[in-house]
Amino acid sequence: MPLLFKDTTYVSETTQFLREFLEQHPDVAQGQVEGRALLWDKQVDRGFQRDADAGRVKQKAYVYQPE
């Protein structure tokens, strides 16, 4: 079989380090989940969002131009 088609999977040193680190420190993965929930996983109040969108004032193309 030619060398081009040899079945090898490359794993970078960075990936190896991260995998080993997460195996040794499982609490870090839980901290990542908690951090994501704190900043990103939020419930959106659709009614409030709709009211906020309706209350927007359209900005002029060039805001510094006098009327």
Image (cartoon, helix red, strand yellow):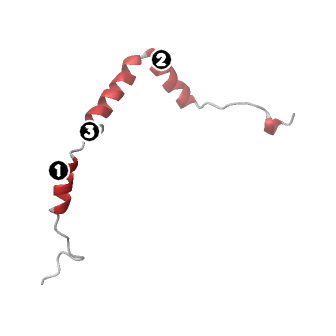
Residue extending furthest toward the left = 67
Q: CA distance from mark 1 to mark 2?
A: 43 Å
Q: Gap in Å between the C-alphas at discs 1 and 3?
A: 14 Å
Judging depth in this view, the residue of 45 and 19 nearest the camera is 45
Q: Which mark is residue 42?
A: 3
At horizontal 17% and vertical 64% (from top left) the residue drawn is: 56
Query: What amino acid type is highlighted by mark number 2?
Result: Glu
Q: Secondary structure at mark 1?
A: helix
Give the x, y percent position of residue 37. Answer: 29, 32
The x and y percentages for residue 46 are 22, 48
Residues packed near mark 2 inside 10 Å, few (<14), some (14 to 19) or many (20 plus)? few
The tag earlier along the polypeptide, 1 or 2, is 2
Q: Is residue 44 left or right of residue 16?
A: left
Establish if 4 lies above or below 46.
Answer: above
Label 1 vs 3, first from the N-terminus: 3
Badge nearest the viewer, 1 or 3: 1
**Relative to the observer, which residue lies in front, 13 or 11?**
11
Residue 13 x, y percent position in the rendering: 57, 29
- The answer to which image quadrant residue 39 occupies is top left
Residue closest to the far front: 47
Please tell me whether residue 29 is drawn above or below residue 53 in the rendered image.
above
* Residue at the spot of label 1: 48
